Image: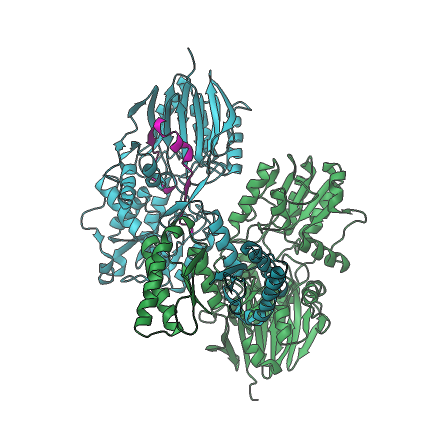
Chain colours: A green, B cyan
Amino acid sequence: MQSKGLSVYALGGLQEIGKNMYAIEHGNDIVVIDCGNKFPDESLLGIDLIIPDFSYLIENQDRVRALIVTHGHEDHIGGIPFFLKKINVPVYATRFTLGLIELKLREHRILRESTLIEIKSDSEVPIGDMKISFFRVNHSIPDCLGIVFNTEEGTIVHTGDFKFDLTPANNERPDIHKMAEIGNKGVLLLLSESTNAERPGYTPSEHMVGSNLDQMIGKAKRKVIVSTFASNVSRIQQVVEASEKHNRKLALLGRSMVNVVQVAMERGYLNVPKGMLIDAREINEMPPEMVTILCTGSQGEVGAALSRLSTGNFRDVEILPEDTVILAAGPIPGNERSVTTIVDNLYKLGAHVIYGSGSSSGMHVSGHGYQEDLRLMLTLMKPKYFVPIHGEYRMLQHHRMLAESVGVEEGNTFIIKNGDVVDIENSIARFTRSIPSGETYVDGVDVGDMEFVLRDRKQISEDGMIVIIIPMNKQDNKLLADPEFFSRGFVDQSFTELKRGMKRITLDTINELLDANRNSRNVLKKNIKRSISQYIKERTRKDPMIIPLLIEV
Amino acid sequence: MQSKGLSVYALGGLQEIGKNMYAIEHGNDIVVIDCGNKFPDESLLGIDLIIPDFSYLIENQDRVRALIVTHGHEDHIGGIPFFLKKINVPVYATRFTLGLIELKLREHRILRESTLIEIKSDSEVPIGDMKISFFRVNHSIPDCLGIVFNTEEGTIVHTGDFKFDLTPANNERPDIHKMAEIGNKGVLLLLSESTNAERPGYTPSEHMVGSNLDQMIGKAKRKVIVSTFASNVSRIQQVVEASEKHNRKLALLGRSMVNVVQVAMERGYLNVPKGMLIDAREINEMPPEMVTILCTGSQGEVGAALSRLSTGNFRDVEILPEDTVILAAGPIPGNERSVTTIVDNLYKLGAHVIYGSGSSSGMHVSGHGYQEDLRLMLTLMKPKYFVPIHGEYRMLQHHRMLAESVGVEEGNTFIIKNGDVVDIENSIARFTRSIPSGETYVDGVDVGDMEFVLRDRKQISEDGMIVIIIPMNKQDNKLLADPEFFSRGFVDQSFTELKRGMKRITLDTINELLDANRNSRNVLKKNIKRSISQYIKERTRKDPMIIPLLIEV
């Protein structure tokens, strides 16, 4: 039988944390797994989101059959509206994940024309010659799946994000028996997530956070404010239960907290006793020892509820001395400073603050498996080939070593980049080619190539800019008035002194060029720009953007 | 006897980490302690340094007698050149600290006119009615002092930065007996540093790093690259010794590494065997197992040696597979992302990388005392009053609790801000007043108030800007030509579409105002700015800076 070919690649998620997007190609069928975004770091000035470059899939859109989503975190669903606007394929996901996707599609006004198909961990989806099935995994959001692709070439497994939590707060245990069975039948290639591949041991259970929350809420004398990820429904459920036990009502602050809790309650993932939820405006009317507040902003995000509370800028709600604030989330790398700034401000308000990095405060556990969790997955699946995914380069390398420690043969692990393709033929996997991949920046409503815009923003933001306005007569090329100068983001005191020099240089340059009969607008501008730039650099050691504007009248 | 008055305050270092500057006033005499800088975070676009606002001291400069420097770290000496340019007082510091200060003053070309006075831990300096003496403390740089101010009101002690390292790598043990004696004679007020007040236990000894370095360098099969702070001379000494033991030559990369090692060697703080140092260009001629490289850049600083090595951009030196890279420094909060990016790049080069947060890798220990170190200092000094310094707000609060746990009376600890003054009269301390304090931004060669400049830079850097040029006739207020628009840092594709709308709005606004005889330039500009801004926000959800320019001919 002629092999149809089976290929695996990523458009996002390899050698980075964020914008996960993987794909399986079998013959004429492409199935996409996840479509996330990532948040830009400070160097991408003013960019709101980064999503994968979809161009390869757009070129092959007649072969794209489905988007399967493993779970509802932003780095797995945040790119979906942008993707569906280009390629409107059916989206398969579990009930809770679909709820979060719907929020997004509604915001982008494309919910009605989208096809959303609910699956469960025991669903089977046939696509082309592939039989696709699923298994339940634990993570820090409900209803997470791993995916199994059964093909004539062999079986490919994608783990999704996972940990093994044997005492999960929601009692939804991982499908370990099913995983064992899949492994027993033979896995040709495993794609497994690598976030915590550097951390030894097992991830602690979500259960641990529950008992600590209960203890702390029980001890608190006044208001309790818990900040966590809105999508961590199990943790929210534990806050609900501890608050109920200690006779506290619950208020929700922050848009995503309100939205996600609503989805979770409507779809049966969160159980809040009737009458327990109160409005933010009711908080002040209650005795403080009867109130728990659940809020967003655990990462120190400016403008989120916790940040506003910490600076006294939240309407109707105030943090007062002896209130207890619990940061039930570890800072994501890069957010440490923002978080400690908030902790500091909370201290200034006189609050007790429970915080700490990682699990050290007892108020947070990771949703991603540590080394022993990863080894357990590898042991259950016994794959012939292994592609570590969802991690920065060093995490993928650590994951490779873990795989080899439990029996994956040396040379059978592929550490690849976004766009690199692993092709499988006759049960042999090879990496020989790449497809286009990259980052797409989203700025406000615009999606596009922002390279020049960013370069401009960066130069202006570091050294400011100087604009030179040169009013010229269209007919005779004579100056109509003296050139004018204005600056933005440039130190003013030196600017006043510099104006005289710039004026002289501009006039000299214009006269020189006109004398030589070189009156092309571009030549004029280029020369003025160069001589002014040089002059400013010498005087100030700064390199502002210089913009000559010829105004022709 | 009439009390002369004794006052204590900070111009930097309280409720922040960085730009330490404290002062003691006794009668007509002001003694300043340290004058550091701090590095701006990303929100201060293009700012190079932050230094304390000296205006209070400048106003009282006829009373400022001396600057005493506890040790040579940037957050204690980085502001000195700027300070001496305003107030040229004698600078007292130990031999090594003076070496580093001299480097700075030479760079600023004010070394010759400065007065530098060398002190030792057993020196005594009389200033006015104060007798000033010192005691040796351990930290992560050689030759550190605590300061004792003996006055008729009582004794004030400033600890400097410290830990208690009973097995320091340089055998310079802390003056514990002297501290005990000072405490026995009675301390009225203690100023003690708070950096690690949140961390339980004792700081591990620098010695521990030495044996780990030795082991790792002994095991390495090829080149070893160690990155650490250039000022941590003890750690550098341990790298020297381990390299010597394992028959390796030593190359230094990075300007500050070369400079500081030179100062340390010249002044007898670092002992490097003759012939051991090699030039960077000689590295490639040596067998790799005979080379150790010491380099700057352990904080992931862009442009520093380690960053350039990690991307293959260091002339003459290359990191190759199986080389060992040791990050012998923990990331300072805020630098985590830059450091992990470098670790990732080093992995891609095939290097073994030894890294980790805090002391977890065994290759770094803090120079700041943990809780038990701080308790020991408080116990030795037995102060009546306590002012925790050198720390963010929550650290100061933690330090207060530590003080109370070892006997400082409740109510006798002052948690104050920069500029707050603690006045002592008849042995009673009170906080009742404040003096001017603040931040001064240094941008290139300019020192000044950058608030407006920064606000501009920020807005432009996030959303770009749009300039509207309106050429008008000075006499009759008529437009001489159509308004022109140009943008920078703004997404171009939408700009082209927006121009038509902006033109219409500008013309409408001008006509409307001129019809109403409101032809003041400011009114015109304000109205155009407002209506264009509104239009752009509606269309693009962005808020670029709008700059209307009237060009009058």
Q: Report if residue A171 is visible in the image.
A: no
Q: Quadrant of residue B208?
A: top left
Would residue A28 be counted in the magenta stretch? no
Residue B77 placement (x, y as % from top left):
35, 39
- As drawn, the residue found furthest toward the left would be B274
Q: Quadrant of residue A523?
A: bottom left
Q: Nearer the viewer, residue A74 or A238?
A: A74
Q: Nearer the viewer, residue B16 or B383?
A: B16
- As drawn, the residue found furthest toward the right would be A274
Residue B358 placement (x, y as % from top left):
45, 46
* Residue depicted at x 29% and y 61%: B317
Residue A118 placement (x, y as % from top left):
72, 69
Q: Quadrant of residue B27?
A: top left
Would residue B49 be counted in the magenta stretch? yes
Q: Report if residue B516 is visible in the image.
A: yes
- As drawn, the residue found furthest toward the top would be B1
Q: Residue A390, relative to residue B454: is it above or below?
A: below
* Quadrant for the N terminus of chain B in the image: top left
- As drawn, the residue found furthest toward the front would be B475
Count of marks overlaid on the render: 0
Would you say A81 lies left or right of B279 here?
Answer: right
Q: Nearer the viewer, residue A181 or B336?
A: B336
Q: Which residues are magenta?
A: B47-75
Residue A328 placement (x, y as % from top left):
62, 47
Q: Residue B229, relative to residue B428: is it above or below?
A: below
